[in-house]
Image: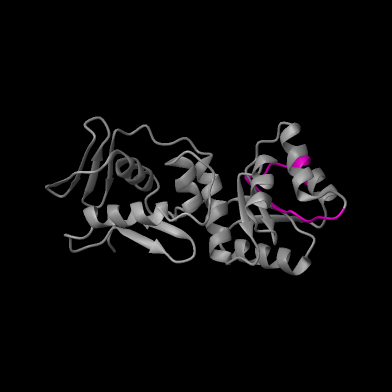
């Protein structure tokens, strides 16, 4: 798996136990975390420091998470924002995303998913490779010829499957969340109830892995998917 570079994260969370839990976990992954216990202090830190990701609790004292996000975006701050909330209804998520959040995670959450989403937000902000030929193990994709092969075997893919595989190959060795795939491959914000991702991944896995000894496409339980070379 490719190593993840250090990420500087601002966590704005009034529940100290939750904030310490996030900071400890991210620090163990090699990331740097600053904390703010309310929305006012969070705005001050976000405006006076450079962060790669901001994690914002929706229900904050002094300045709530939605208002904080709108304020940052209004000030021209484009740092990726992950909003945390115990409010998980569709309208709650939509409100957070419309305020300017890039992703929305409902409490309680698994740390592995939080980590994956933070790292995904950072990767999403990076320009994609201009390469016209992608390779992962013996799997190759020629973007100009629109051709996919595993070893000497040509694999026929539907347009959406091709786009899905391209995104997975560009992020090989990294966990790719369902949210990332819906936004980057299907071009819309996520509906966590849809099974469109699982259906397409299953079809793709059947084409690139089923007839071969070494699987390349893996499900990362509670987080998403990863395309990686065999060990």
Task: State whether residue 176 is above or below residue 76.
Answer: below
Between 228 and 102, the one lying in front of the other is 102
State the image quarter where residue 228 is shown: bottom left
Total label count?
Answer: 0
Q: Is residue 215 left or right of residue 83?
A: left
- Over which residues does the magenta segment extend? 45-61
Q: Is residue 113 visible?
A: yes
**Does residue 77 sit above or below 64 in this rendering?**
above
Quarter holding the C terminus is bottom left
Q: How is the image coloured?
A: one colour
Q: Position of residue 212 (x, y in %)?
A: 17, 60
Image quadrant containing the N terminus: bottom left
Q: How far across and how far down the image is residue 23, in percent?
A: 67, 62
The picture quadrant where one finds residue 78 is top right
Q: Please tell me which residue is depicted at 61% across the width and 61% down the height of the picture.
A: 26
Q: Any magenta on residue 88?
A: no
Q: Residue at x 62, y 45 (%)?
A: 52
Dividing the picture into quadrants, the one containing residue 224 is bottom left
> Could you say where residue 9 lies in the image, as x and y percent from the top left?
66, 51
State the residue lying farthest toward the left.
152
Please tell me whether residue 57 belongs to the stretch shown in magenta.
Answer: yes
Residue 94 place in picture, x, y as percent: 64, 46
Residue at figure coordinates x 57%, y 52% from the top left: 118
Describe residue 206's horizontal placement relative to residue 45 as left or right: left
Front one among 69 and 133: 69
Residue 227 visible, this orientation: no
């Amino acid at each position: 798996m490719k190593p993840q570079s250090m990420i500087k994260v601002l966590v704005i969370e009034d529940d100290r136990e939750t904030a310490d839990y996030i900071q400890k976990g991210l620090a163990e992954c090699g990331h740097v975390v600053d904390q703010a216990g309310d929305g006012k202090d969070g705005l001050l830190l976000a405006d006076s420091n450079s962060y790669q990701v901001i994690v914002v609790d929706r229900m904050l004292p002094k300045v709530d998470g939605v208002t904080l996000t709108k304020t940052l975006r209004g000030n021209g701050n484009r740092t990726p924002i992950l909003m945390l909330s115990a409010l998980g209804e569709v309208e709650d998520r939509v409100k957070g995303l419309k305020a300017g959040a890039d992703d929305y995670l409902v409490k309680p959450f698994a740390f592995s998913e939080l980590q994956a989403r933070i790292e995904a937000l950072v990767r999403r902000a990076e320009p994609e490779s201009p390469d016209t030929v992608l390779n992962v193990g013996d799997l190759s994709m020629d973007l100009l010829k629109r051709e996919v092969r595993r070893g000497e075997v040509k694999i026929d893919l539907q347009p959406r499957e091709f786009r899905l595989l391209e995104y997975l190959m560009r992020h090989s060795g990294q966990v790719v969340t369902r949210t990332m795939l819906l936004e980057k491959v299907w071009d819309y914000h996520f509906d966590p109830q849809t099974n469109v991702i699982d259906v397409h991944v299953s079809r793709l896995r059947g084409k690139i892995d089923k007839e071969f000894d070494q699987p390349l496409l893996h499900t990362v339980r509670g987080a998403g998917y990863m395309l990686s070379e065999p060990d």
